Image: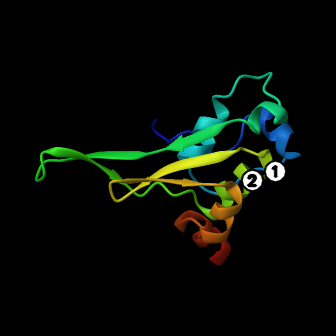
Amino acid sequence: MCSEASPRLRPHVARLTGGRQPRSMTQHAEIAALNLLPEGISLRQLRHMTLVVIRPKYSQKLRRTRMLCAQPCRECAGIIHQLGIKLVVFSSEDVLHRRTPEELLTASVPSSGTEWLIRS
């Protein structure tokens, strides 16, 4: 999924976060996926959900598709945690990693766009 759309959560998802919106300049893959959730989704249903985020890229040199780093940034990890999503699977250097939202929060760093906003 391409993440060139608005960085904002759609109203039905933002409602579940108490109105919290990401502070990024571009829409991250996690936000794009969350925005595709059906309008009637509940926090109870999200507690059973696993979010999968991968970043495939074909390498002409290797003649195969590689999985690049798609670890959620701190802002996305916070929203995932607030929504109560059960588990996140993400790619990094051709490996899939499984993390709880709590583990993501501990290991996450701000996105480059968020760092730019903070400095400005």
Question: Which amino acid does the dot numbered 2 rest on?
Answer: His
Image location of residue 100, percent across then percent down: 66, 55
Give the side of residue 63 with respect to residue 113, left or right. Answer: left
Query: What secondary structure is marked by label 1?
Result: loop
Mark 2 surroundings within 10 Å by alpha-carbon count, few (fewer than 14), some (14 through 19), many (20 or more): many
Q: Which mark is residue 32?
A: none
Against 93, is 16 above or below?
above
Q: How far apart are the alpha carbons under marks 2 and 1?
A: 12 Å
Which residue is denoted by mark 2 in the rendering?
81
Q: Residue at x 89, y 46 (%)?
A: 18
Give coordinates of residue 64: x percent, y percent: 18, 44
Please report whichever mark, 2 or 1, sits nearer to the chain's N-terminal start: 1
Is residue 6 in view from this perspective?
no
**The C terminus lies in which quarter of the figure?**
bottom right
Q: Which residue is mark 1?
A: 20
Decide if residue 50 is on the left or right side of residue 55.
Answer: right
Instruction: Identify the residue at image location x=80%, y=51%.
Output: 82
